[in-house]
Image: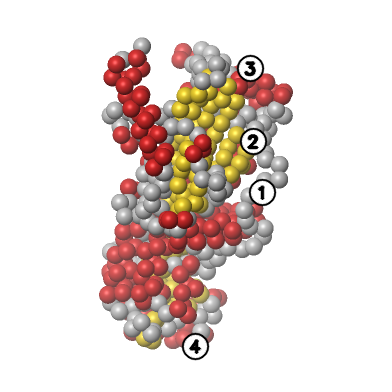
Amino acid sequence: MSGPFGLPLALLTDSYKASHAAVFPSALSATAYAEFRQPFNNDPSDHRMVFYGLQYIITTYVSRVWTDTDVDTAKAFFSTHNAGHSAFPFPETLFRKFVRENNGHFPIRIYAMREGSVVYPHTPVMQISARDEYAGLVTYLESVLLMTWYPSAVATLSRKAHTRIKERYSQSVDDSAMWTLESRMHDFGFRACTCVEQSMLGGAAHLLTFAGSDTMSAAYYVQHVLNGGRPVATSVPATEHSVMTAYQSERQAVMRVLDEYGKGVVACVLDSYDYARALRDVLPIVAERQVRDGGMFVIRPDSGDQVEAVLMGLQAADKVFGSTLNSKGYKVIRNASVIQGDGVTLDSLERILDAVLNAGFSAECVGFGMGGGLLQKLDRDMMGMAVKLSSITYEDGQTRDIMKFPKQGSSKVSLPGKFSVHADAAQNGAPVAYRASHAPSDPDLLQLVYDCGPVPGHTWDSFDAVRARLDDQWTRFPKIARAVSDDLLDYQKLIHDRQEQRVNDGSAFA
């Protein structure tokens, strides 16, 4: 079999998709598109989102070559998949046809925004089409293509964290120390993932913005698969509670750690027994040693109130390590800092940073780790990603542009027709969707990435280039933009009104 995990490729979809080709109207072509329907977590003040992860989906799943063995194995599965373990319908004839006539490549065409593109609600991030007898397969791979929601959501979350941290950096950190910004959010999420593949994809999405990561599956994937061997992620030696409690005392544990790693950056968890006492009794010894050796000691609390724990660590470190006042009037602790990695969210991150600045410390004195909150506590509804049919050309040549507008679900209204996406100079280059037939003359941002098989000559951008694209566009684009052209909105209203008339007069149900 050609599919991953011992699966035939025909099963990389939802069950009901297999029944659609037989009931789809005969057509010369069909077009669908993908969009995010809402900003991340319905944020009313910032609609920017990151589109990322399609390269993995295309190369790992969509571009795989189907074989007759895949179809045979799928047929055996479908033979007992219907209710009562009876045969479930699936388009066996179409599958065998493209195995023979298209070298086993799935017969759809995909245009997409580039990896790392900043988009908005209703930006078409993908446009999918199929022709002739394969028109009914246009959304067969919808489910696997929609899985880009996950790396896109992680990438957006990390970028939003970066935005919040950067705001406090601008207020409290000297220009000479701004380079530390990319290490302020560390990926602790490997153990929170449901599988290694998730950690790799989500961890890579985080690395579009930050460089700190303990998720080595992602660090390796980014460096050696996506970036030509050039490293992106870094980490530092650090302890966990098993190391600290293996010694008779925390002092012994810390001194052993400093013997091994004290000349560089090292992090120690200090709440195995009593965080306050560890700060009082152990930290002075650490300070004496670290100042002598020139290393950086990172204090990690792992329980208690998040804000209080960070301030306790900073105040204790200030007392024994000392600090300098930077040009912006904030304290920078010598040879020490604090990292909070216990239950961090975007909201708690802001509370911690504001408390740190209010206490007179620079934002560079605190870092953050995010685990389950970064790689696991997300879902497709956070940005409402969906694929919808938008146009069909029937066998008689009549084209019908289609939209969905459920009376009881206005948030699920879709766009009709075929689209192109263009940079809008009036909005600093932010993407705007147009009807393909009424588009500007400048280049379409939707690029061909799959054409009934791999696109000859197409190469994916390096990870460095994707990072640079995201950084540039996130900085340059407005937080809220007009993402759909007036012409397309007018056309949507026209199609809506026509269809609504058919609903009202009953012909839509005849």
Residue type at tag 4:
Arg
Which residue is nearer to you in this view: 204 or 481?
A: 481
Single out the mark in the foreground, 2 or 4: 2
Q: Which mark is residue 451?
A: 2
Q: Which residue is painted at 39% across and 72% down in the image? A: 169
Residue type at tag 2:
Asp
Mark pair 4, 3: CA separation: 75 Å
For the residues labelled 1 and 3, say whether their Cβ atoms are less than 8 Å apart.
no
User: Picture quarter containing residue 110?
Assistant: top right
Residue type at tag 1:
Thr
For the residues labelled 2 and 1, say whether their Cβ atoms are less than 8 Å apart.
no
**Residue 127, image x and y in percent?**
53, 37
Residue type at tag 3:
Thr
Please say if 70 is above or below 201: above
Which residue is nearer to you in this view: 238 or 68?
A: 68
Mark pair 1, 4: CA separation: 51 Å
Q: Earlier in the sequence, mark 3 or mark 2?
A: 3
User: Picture quarter containing residue 301?
Assistant: bottom left
From the image, tell me which residue sits under label 3: 93
Mark pair 3, 2: CA separation: 21 Å
Q: Which mark is residue 292?
A: 4
Q: Which residue is painted at 28% across and 19% down in the image? A: 504
Number of callouts: 4
> In the image, 101: left or right of 84?
right
Give neighbour class at mark 2: few <14, some 14-19, many 20+ (Cα, 10 Å): some
From the image, tell me which residue sits under label 1: 459
